Image (cartoon, rainbow, N blue to C red):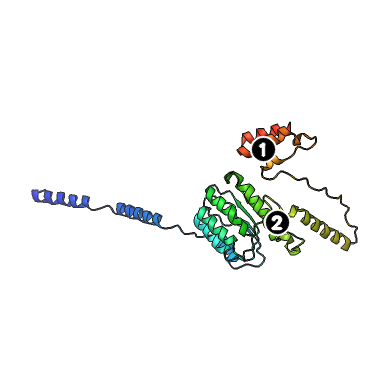
Amino acid sequence: MTDLDHRASKKAKASAAEEPNPREVMHVTEGCSKVRSSNRQAVFRPQASAKALLDGVAANQPGLKILKLKGVVTEDSEQSVDAIIEALGQNTTIQVVYFQGFGRGMLDPQLRRLLQVLQRPECAVWAMNIGESPRLSDDAWWAFAEGMKTTKLGALFAEPNHLPFGVKPSMIDTLRENRKLHRWHDLQTHPENVEVVAKCDKMWWHPACSTRNQEFLARQQDERRVSQGLAPKEREPQQPKKGRKRGGPTTARKQVRGGGGSNSEATRELQDEVWATGWRGEKQKQARRKIKFL
């Protein structure tokens, strides 16, 4: 090889080394594309079943009075929760909502928007299970508890371990007051709502167990028996429910069956201490066991 050929070969190798590898170019390009796409706002693309359900909610699908989202809308994100709330904001027939399985997507802005939807005069929702929402702030829960006064909510469930201290008793008081104003849960007022009331469960208060609804269902059963030529069923008269202390945790309010130890001064003091300190977990279990044997 001549001196000239050697220099030409060396120059060709140097220029080839400066040219980027096509695979490396593709890798860099793909990486940049990923970076650009990660900076874009995520878009909720529901599956066919989820899209059909949300379209039915927005269009007031006949017969859709209980909305169960778990297992249908499987994506837990802020965008999926926004889409659900948007569809619910156009609905006027749904009465019970199960908003479970959205612990990641339910944030403060979503809860504020949900409250606005529930406050609409045409909104028919009177029962809601919001499930576990660990990412909500204390301020958001307090704002929701205050805003509930202008909704029709008479039954609710929210994971108590995720609520700030004092919010649940405030919510329960509001739910009681709302039930006096809005009677969709009462079968003696709305007998056509029997199927919805019967399926409304997993709440702090179950409407099917109310005294008025139990009386209504008993009368219905007797009417069916008479129509079949049978005598009405004999029932023992219901004993009036004993009043219980309001405001304390359910576990500390329960009275011990048999004996009068539950009304002792020591028991009341320990119950008040459980409520005042907001004990949780093992400490609360120890307190309950101590109350039992007082």
The quadrant of the rendering that contains the C terminus is: top right
Q: Nearer the viewer, mark 1 or mark 2?
A: 1
Q: Which mark is residue 37?
A: none
For numbered disc 2, what is the local secondary structure? helix
In the rendered structure, the answer to whether residue 143 lies left or right of residue 243 reads: left
Residue 195 location (% of width, % of height): 73, 60
64 to the left or right of 212: left
* Alpha carbon distance from label 1 to label 2: 35 Å
Left or right relative to 136: residue 21 = left
Label placed on residue 272: 1
CB contact under 8 Å: marks 1 and 2: no
In the image, is residue 147 above or below residue 270?
Answer: below
Q: Quadrant of residue 97?
A: bottom right
Task: Give whichever of 50, 111 is nearer the camera.
Answer: 111
Q: Position of residue 82 (x, y in %)?
A: 52, 59
Q: Which residue is mark 2?
A: 199
How far from the left and from the top, in percent, is residue 109? 50, 55
- Give, as a three-letter code, the residue at label 1: Asp
Examine the rendered structure and indicate whether residue 261 appears above or below residue 236. Answer: above
Q: Residues within 10 Å of mark 1 (few under 14, many from 20)?
A: some
| Residue at x 34% of width, y 54% of height | 32
The residue nearer to you, when weighing 141 against 23, is 141
Residue 222 coordinates in the image, percent (x, y): 85, 58
User: Where on the picture, by quarter, is residue 74?
Assistant: bottom right
- Front-most of residues 34 and 143: 143
Which residue of the protein is positioned furthest toward the left in this rendering?
3
Q: Mark 2 belongs to which amino acid?
A: Lys
Instruction: Say if residue 279 shows up in the picture.
Output: no
